[in-house]
Image (tube, rainbow, N blue to C red):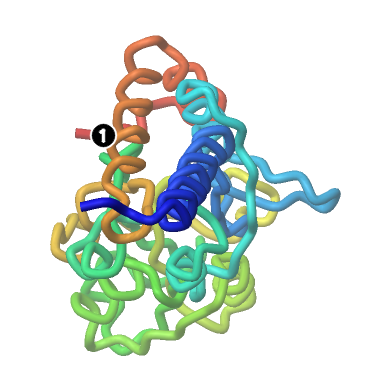
Amino acid sequence: MRIPTRFLAAASIAALSLFAGSTMAQEKLIIGTEGAYPPFNNLEADGTLVGFDIDIANALCEEMKVSCEFVTQDWDGIIPALQAKKFDAIIASMSITPERLEKVDFSKKYYNTPPAVAVPKDSPITDLAGLKGKAIGAQSSTTHANYAEKHMADSELKLYPTADEYKLDLEGGRVDAVVDDIVVLSEWLKSDAGTCCKILTPLEVDVEINGEGAGIAVRKGETELADKLSAAIEAIRANGKYAEINKKYFDFDVYGE
């Protein structure tokens, strides 16, 4: 069967467009991050993005031989923004959980640290049982909020748009305790702003809620990109770049088990 020339021309243009789009995607990776979750990602006063997530993202882009472009996005809307193609991937300490896997695909993990509870230094609470009936703060739409809702159901859960806001309320006595990643809490407690408080205890990981570690989210079906990111994670683990970044922020390997 012969195909009219005009159809061949149209098909060629479409193929070239797809090829150009693919090439462009390989030259630049647009990354969504929150910019409000130190020490993993934080937006400085001068507009600079800093943190472990940001350095890892740049190392992965270098390994993949693409340029990185970052877009900051409020946490509550970060998955919808990915789905709306505002960016190509999320590198923002997002845990790989069954619930999120229904909406996005993930690379392999790039770190895995447990949750913990922090309280004021003068708190009478000495163990998890002491949280009963108390007000607990957590960032909304996070695994830590889900953890508190499930495992601390006899407490009053207060949700906040960002981690900075629950920290202010813990310092000001408006909540009795907060739940977050142990690294986030520990780094905050080392700062001048965190001198008010202490770690009460690490929490036992609930894999159904906490997942298998933080991974890089991509749109559903974009497994080729997820696989490339996973390969790049393995490469920077092997060539020492990951260890170099890890040492800049932490005194232990956050990659975990």
42 displayed left or right of 232: right
Assign the C terminus to one quadrant of the image: top left
Could you say which is closer to the camera, residue 223 or residue 102? 223
Residue occupying image coordinates x 26% and y 84%: 132
Visible in this render: residue 37? yes
Residue occupying image coordinates x 40% and y 75%: 141
Outermost residue, right side: 46
Residue occupying image coordinates x 45% and y 73%: 80
Visible in this render: residue 186? no
Identify the residue under disc 1. 256
Q: Is residue 153 above or below residue 169?
A: below
On the image, the x and y values in percent for residue 21 come to 52, 45
Query: Residue flagged by tag 1: what amino acid is it?
Result: Gly
On the image, the x and y values in percent for residue 74 come to 58, 69
On the image, the x and y values in percent for residue 222 come to 32, 51
Residue occupying image coordinates x 27% and y 46%: 223
54 displayed left or right of 19: right
Could you say which is closer to the camera, residue 148 or residue 42? 42
On the image, the x and y values in percent for residue 154 come to 23, 88
Q: Is residue 48 above or below residue 239?
A: below
Looking at the rendered structure, the secondary structure element under dot 1 is loop
